[in-house]
Image: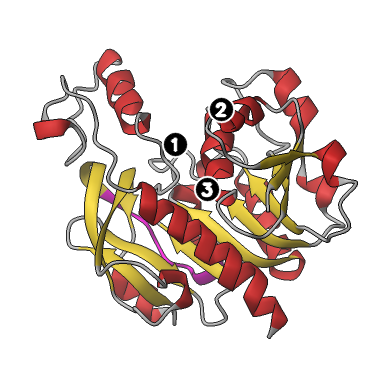
Amino acid sequence: MPINIPSKLPAAEILRGENIFIMTEERARTQDIRPLQIGILNLMPTKITTETQLLRLLANTPLQAEITFVQMDSHISKNTPAVHLNTFYHTFADISHRHFDGFIITGAPVEMLPFSAVDYWDELCAGMEWTKTNVYSVMHICWSAQAALYYHYGIEKYNLEKKLSGVYKHKVTQPHSRLMRGFDGEFYAPHSRYTTVKKTDILSAGLSVLSESETAGMYIAVNSNRRQIFITGHAEYDIHTLDAEYRRDTEKGLNPEPPVNYYRDDNPDNQPVMLWRAHAHLLFSNWLNYYVYYDKLL
């Protein structure tokens, strides 16, 4: 079954070109089915790119999903046209009365700031509190995973000596978890961040670590009822995302190191190699199938 999105959303044409099954809102209204309600709080600066990346993964499921995009009312986006946000996005005030089967909170390039220094921190905290009663399962990605771990469990983040950027090998630590069903014992996933959390803090808070990397640290953790998922990497990234970040930082004079295990022969003059697509699709389809849909039936 498809994802339901507005027909004029820029991602719609891109996904059609990739032969991904989508359904416009107009056609969806003719279907006699109750789709999963999925909200996406998009904190990334390049929102249109992130929309496409997430929708590509959410479409890989037999379940029909209706997508609602959410933005911060207390933050003005500098990289996305206002007309796009006004057309396709809602604020928490707009959706506060609604209930969602699943909700995704993306990362944001603000990890070097203390949480309280982020201009939309208070609004984000109110939103995370709202998810406790209005959302069945929440997936937090990268910075929002660290933010949610801090807000819900008081778990601190720590600065790294240098940016963690690249595609890292991970292992499954709880193979019987439904979220990890079908995963190989080892798989690859991208990371792009300046901060980290400690596994010992995660376990002390009563959370379960489902996957980790010797280099990148804890990757996936869940709470006891599986309604909060914390992912420290970026499975949703497409093949060129890390390259774009590397070129951007190079142009800014930040002298970044090339992303690890990403370019062919580790040479940034060569093309990147996609090592994580299958894992990314499996992660999102498992979340939708088992944590968002199946758990509600039990």
* Furthest residue in direction top, as rendered: 251
Q: Is residue 250 visible?
A: yes
* Residue under the point 37% across and 52% down: 278
Q: Quadrant of the C terminus?
A: bottom right
Query: Image quadrant of residue 194?
Result: top left
* Residue under the point 60% across and 53% down: 104
Between circles 2 and 1, the one closer to the viewer is: 2
Query: Which one is in front, 172 or 228?
Result: 172
Sequence-first disc among 3 and 1:
3
Q: Helix or strand or loop: what does disc 2 sit on? A: helix
The residue identified by callout 3 is: 57
Amino acid carrying label 1: it is: Pro
Sequence-first disc among 2 and 1:
2
The residue identified by callout 1 is: 109
The residue identified by callout 2 is: 17
* Residue under the point 22% across and 25% down: 271
Amino acid carrying label 3: it is: Leu
Amino acid carrying label 2: it is: Gly
What segment carries the magenta color?
152-159
* Furthest residue in direction front, as rendered: 19
Q: Are marks 2 and 1 in contact (CB under 8 Å)?
A: no
Sequence-first disc among 3 and 2:
2
* Residue under the point 67% across and 41% down: 22
